[in-house]
Image: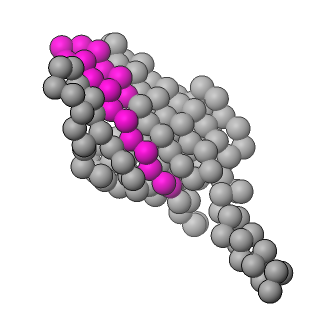
Amino acid sequence: MTRLLLTLLLIAFVPLANAGVGDVYYCVMESAGVIESPSGHRPLKLDKFTMKWQESKIDIREGEFEFTNAIVVSERESFTAIKYNQGNIDYWSFKDGRLQRVSALNGVRSSVIVTTATCEKFDK
């Protein structure tokens, strides 16, 4: 019985152990919200998106929107990507199938968007 349980656990985590450059992930948001000044916090619609892990960047497609963030730290199964554009900072952190995103917008309106998602690798 112990061997069966260990085998099942190993099989369940094999896709994460092989995460890395060239992989495409299907991500589902678990939580998303925006904090705006002075109105406070409001939830955002939970959505799905795809993410492709390139050598030095992450390509993200969310509905009709596509954007790219440069990778600043990359390890075998995790990355941190950041994009800075005219006072706006977009920070992505991926590890063990979990993605965290924090976007700080400092312009006409100041706001912070926080999103968490779980991601599964597409099998080729």
Q: Is the C terminus in the top left, top right, bottom left or bottom right quadrant? A: bottom right
**Residue 52 is inside the magenta segment:** no
Query: In the image, is 8 to the left or to the right of 23?
Result: right
Q: Is any atom of residue 67 visible in this view?
A: no
Image mark count: 0
Residue 77 seen anywhere in this rendered image of the structure = yes
Q: Position of residue 100 (x, y in %)?
A: 48, 40
Q: Residue at x 49, y 34 (%)?
A: 92
Q: Position of residue 101 (x, y in %)?
A: 44, 36
| Residue 106 painted magenta | yes
- Residue 124 placement, left or right of 100: right
Please tell me which residue lies in front, 99 or 38: 38
Q: Residue at x 78, y 83 (%)?
A: 4
Q: Quadrant of residue 16?
A: bottom right
Viewer-closest of 30 and 28: 30
In this view of the protein, which residue sits in the foreground, 92 or 35? Answer: 35
Residue 87, located in which quarter of the rendered image?
Answer: top left
How far from the left and from the top, in percent, is residue 6? 78, 74
Residue at 80 percent across and 86 percent down: it is 1
Magenta stretch: dominant SS?
strand
- Seen in the picture, residue 34 relative to 117 is either above or below; the reply is above
Q: In percent of the image, x 82 and y 80: which residue is there?
A: 2
In the rendered image, the residue lying farthest to the bottom is 1
Which residue range is magenta in the image? Answer: 103-119
Vertical position of residue 39 compared to residue 76: above or below: above
Residue 82 appears at what percent x and percent y?
49, 26
